[in-house]
Amino acid sequence: MTLIEGDGIGPEISQSVKDIYSAANVPIKWEPVDVTPILKDGRTAIPDEAIDSVKRNYVALKGPLAVSMAVYRVSNGG
């Protein structure tokens, strides 16, 4: 399963979820990926490795992600 740990408390929350699945003997092979935005063809994008992981695994667990205010303003027309 693709694991996007996230920012801030995300890694701690993700570890707790992994611990719960482990305690329940659920056989999950975690595939951690980094979704820190990159520049691709002059645009901000999620790294191909992260997208490929989700496509390969069909499912992902995502922790909370921080949103840059610059990205927020651009995406909201401000």
Image (cartoon, rainbow, N blue to C red):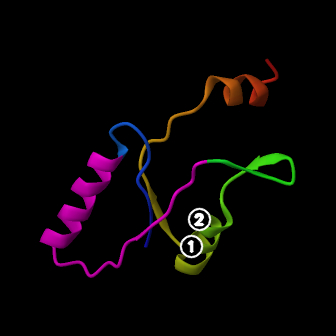
Q: Quadrant of residue 73?
A: top right
Question: Quadrant where the C terminus lies?
Answer: top right
Residue that numbered label 2 is attached to:
50
Q: x, y (%) of residue 53? A: 56, 73
Callout count: 2
Is residue 23 found inside the magenta-colored segment of the image?
yes
Residue interval drawn in magenta: 11-36
Q: Tag 1, which secondary structure?
A: helix
What amino acid type is highlighted by mark number 1?
Ser
Is residue 50 found inside the magenta-colored segment of the image?
no
What residue do we see at 13% from left, 70% from top?
A: 23
Q: Residue furthest right?
A: 41
Residue 24's label in the rendered image is none
What residue do we see at 22% from left, 54% from top?
A: 16
Q: x, y (%) of residue 40? A: 80, 54
Q: Residue furthest left?
A: 23
Q: Please rate how many residues cluster around mark 1, counting C-alpha atoms within 10 Å: few if below 14, some from 14 to 19, many from 20.
A: some
In the visual, does 7 lie left or right of 34?
left
Q: Is residue 68 above or below residue 30?
A: above
In the visual, does 24 lie left or right of 30?
left
Q: Please rate how many residues cluster around mark 2, counting C-alpha atoms within 10 Å: few if below 14, some from 14 to 19, many from 20.
A: many
Kindly indicate whether the residue at mark 2 contacts the one at mark 1 (C-beta within 8 angstroms).
yes
Q: Tag 2, which secondary structure?
A: helix
What distance separates the C-alpha of mark 1 from that of mark 2? 5 Å
In the visual, does 72 lie left or right of 4?
right
What residue do we see at 55% from left, 75% from top?
A: 58
Residue 53's label in the rendered image is 1
What amino acid type is highlighted by mark number 2?
Ala
What residue do we see at 66% from left, 60% from top?
A: 47
Q: Residue furthest top?
A: 78
Q: x, y (%) of residue 44? A: 75, 46
